[in-house]
Amino acid sequence: MVETMDPILAGRPQMAAARLEQAFSDLAACEICQHRCAVNRMDGPAGRCGAGAEPHVFSAQVEVGDELEVIPAYAVALAGCNMRCAFCITGDESWHPQRGRWYHATAIAGRASAAIESRRAESLLVLGGEPTIHLPWLLELVAAMPENARLVLKTNGLSTAPARAILAGLFDVWIVDFKFGNDACAQTLSRTPGYTSAVCETLQWAARDTDLIIRHLLMPGHVDCCWKPVAEWISSHLPTAKVSLRSGYWPSWRASDHVPLNRPLASAELSAAMETARFFNLRLVP
Ligand code: SF4
């Protein structure tokens, strides 16, 4: 087991390369996310996420749709996810592990480095699907990036301690989605048992290891049950954390099966959400 390391970024590519063997070993009895399937992914897809040992990339391009401090970013989206959010904006493009195609991580690192060198991008942003289910590929990517490149990981926060130990000190910024304020909504809308304790554990770890941005997408009809408990938890446990409150919800994929997720956010809901953020004195970032 790799222990959590001091997040000093000197030698980051070497640190990533040195952890590769452990990362492949972890896939052989995969418990790197909250679902803890304990299956061997080295022989092919076997667990709940349906991902094997190597990810497909379904998008790799410069993007400007994320938090201001990380854009423009060369954004690399890996197919495959351990959640099934009914309102997923990319639908099966992101959760189906066979969407897109396989690229060697060094090829993607070359493109990202070129974008950063030419100032078309300020950082490399890795997202999904869920990128942390693809540990070996992530390590290969980091190992191939220049030492001083700004690396950003966007995750749903379901990684377990062994996965976080592999990733410790490798990314400058973690953007963690805190989607649901209670386990019932998480189970109904994303088929994820044990959601809140798993995400809160990751958030507290990430606040120690890296520059953390907590993201919450406001969902219609879920301001009271999801945003308010999320805001209260942040206020109690990570009061100085940066919070990115996203109001651009759009009903996608299977949202129409979960009324009221079949409509955009109402302006009154946005006002109530902002009032909650003010009440808890949260540090909102654009
Ligand atoms: S990453 Fe998670 S869902 Fe996928 S096989 Fe491993 S434990 Fe299961």
Image (cartoon, grey):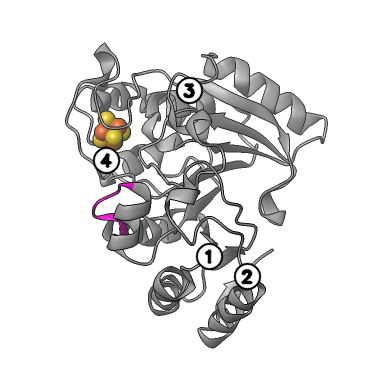
Residue for point 32% across, 27% down: 23
Front-lying residue, 189 or 98? 189
Question: Which amino acid, by three-letter code, is at mark 2?
Answer: Ala
162 is higher (above) or lower (below) than 229:
above
Within 10 Å of disc 1 (Cα), the crowding (few <14, some 14-19, many 20+) is many
Residue labelled with disc 4: 162
The residue labelled by disc 1 is: 220
Mark nearer the N terminus (1 vs 3): 3
Q: Secondary structure at mark 4?
A: helix
Label 3, secondary structure: give it.
helix
Viewer can see residue 247 = yes
Contact between labelled residues 2 and 1, with CB atoms less than 8 Å apart: yes
Q: Which residues are magenta?
A: 191-196
Q: Which circle, 4 or 2, is nearer the viewer?
A: 2
Q: Is the magenta region chiefly helix, strand or loop?
A: loop
> Distance of mark 2 from mark 3, alpha carbons?
43 Å
Q: Residues within 10 Å of mark 3 (few under 14, many from 20)?
A: some
Secondary structure at badge 1 equals loop
Q: Mark 4 is on which residue type?
A: Pro
Cα distance in 3D space between marks 4 and 1 = 35 Å
Amino acid tagged 3: Glu
Quadrant hosting residue 24 = top left
Q: Quadrant of the N terminus?
A: top left
Picture coordinates of residue 230 (x, y %)?
A: 42, 70
Nearer the N terminus, badge 1 or badge 2? 1
Cα separation, mark 4 vs mark 2, equals 40 Å
Q: Is residue 7 left or right of residue 147?
A: left
* Mark 2 vs 3, N-terminal side: 3
- Quick check: 281 left or right of 165? right
Q: Of the numbered discs in the image, which one, if any, rests on residue 266?
A: 2
Question: Is residue 227 or residue 5 the one in the foreground?
Answer: 227
Q: Are marks 4 and 3 in contact (CB under 8 Å)?
A: no
